[in-house]
Image: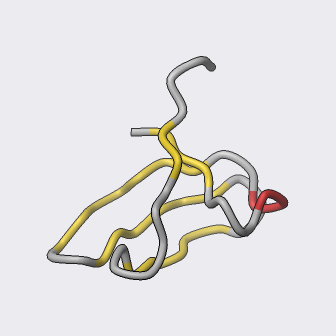
Amino acid sequence: MMVRHPEEPDWGLGQVQSVIGARATVNFEHAGKVVIDLRHVTLQPVFDL
C-alpha cells in the first residue's frame, strides 16, 4: 500500500513494507525506511498514482 505521512510531507510517497501490531515499516522516497507507531500517527493512503 502507498501512503503519505501527514506531518512529514517532505518525505514523499511511502510504500508500506510490513505492519506488526501497532508498528508499520514504511519505505519513503526521501526519508528511506522509517518505523512508525500507528498509535500516534495516522498514515494517509494514496490511491491515485
Residue drawn at 49 percent across, 48 percent down: 15
41 horizontally vs 6: left or right: left
Q: Position of residue 28 (x, y in %)?
A: 63, 58
Residue drawn at 45 percent across, 77 percent down: 36
In the image as oriented, which residue stretches furthest toward the top? 48
Number of numbered discs visible in the structure rendering: 0
45 horizontally vs 6: left or right: left
Q: Position of residue 23 (x, y in %)?
A: 30, 77
Q: Position of residue 46 (x, y in %)?
A: 54, 33
The quadrant where residue 48 appears: top right
Q: Position of residue 22 (x, y in %)?
A: 24, 77
Residue drawn at 79 percent across, 57 percent down: 9
Q: Please determine whether, in this image, residue 18 is positioned above or below residue 34.
A: above
Nearer the observer, 33 or 3? 3
The quadrant where residue 21 appears: bottom left
Query: In what quadrant of the picture does the C terminus appear?
Result: top right
Residue drawn at 61 percent across, 50 percent down: 4
